[in-house]
Image (spheres, rainbow, N blue to C red):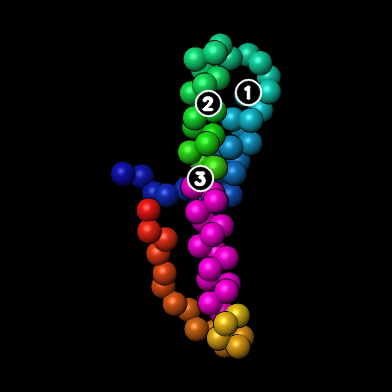
Amino acid sequence: MGKEKSFEESMQELEKIVQELENNDLNLDESVKKFEDGMEISKKCNKILEEAEKKITILLENNGEIEEKNFKIEE
């Protein structure tokens, strides 16, 4: 299993998919597959952002004291 892509890498991949869909060079099956791939990447990016937001909230709730706590979003 390969390493997990970073948020930035995922966003670049998502932008590439959007461009491919906008070019109208794909047939219907290819377009649907690209759309599905894009939705999956979008979900992963959203999860990364939610985790970052929770981490920031935890830091702020500790009166600005840097105390990092581990948390996991359950699927």
Q: Of tags 3 and 2, which is closer to the observer?
A: 3
* Three-letter amino acid code at the position of disc 3: Lys
Closer to us: 9 or 41: 41
- Which image quadrant for residue 70? bottom left
Task: Kindly state the secondary structure of the residue where label 3 is placed.
Answer: helix
In the image shown, does 20 or 3 lie closer to the viewer?
A: 20
Query: What is the CA distance from the residue labelled 3 to the residue labelled 1?
Result: 18 Å
Q: Position of residue 14 (x, y in %)?
A: 58, 37
Location of residue 50 in the rendering, given as x and y in whole percent from the top left corner: 54, 59
Q: Earlier in the sequence, mark 3 or mark 2?
A: 2
| Residue 74 or residue 24, whichever sits in front | 74
Q: Residue at x 52, y 36 (%)?
A: 39
Q: Residue at x 49, y 47 (%)?
A: 44
Q: Residues within 10 Å of mark 1 (few under 14, many from 20)?
A: some
Q: Which mark is residue 45?
A: none
Instruction: Work out whether mark 3 precedes mark 1 in sequence or the reverse, and give the earlier one.
Output: 1
Residue 16 spot, x, y in % from top left: 61, 32
Looking at marks 2 and 1 on the same chain, the residue that comes earlier in the sequence is marked by 1
Left or right? Give the position of 31 relative to 3. right
The magenta stretch spans which residues?
44-59
Residue 67 position (above or below residue 43): below
Residue behind mark 1? 21
* CB-based contact (under 8 Å), mark 2 and mark 1: yes
54 part of magenta stretch: yes
Residue 65: percent from left, percent from top: 57, 88
Identify the residue at horizontal 55%, vertical 86% (top origin).
62
Residue marked by disc 3: 43
Which element type, helix, strand or loop, lies under badge 2? helix
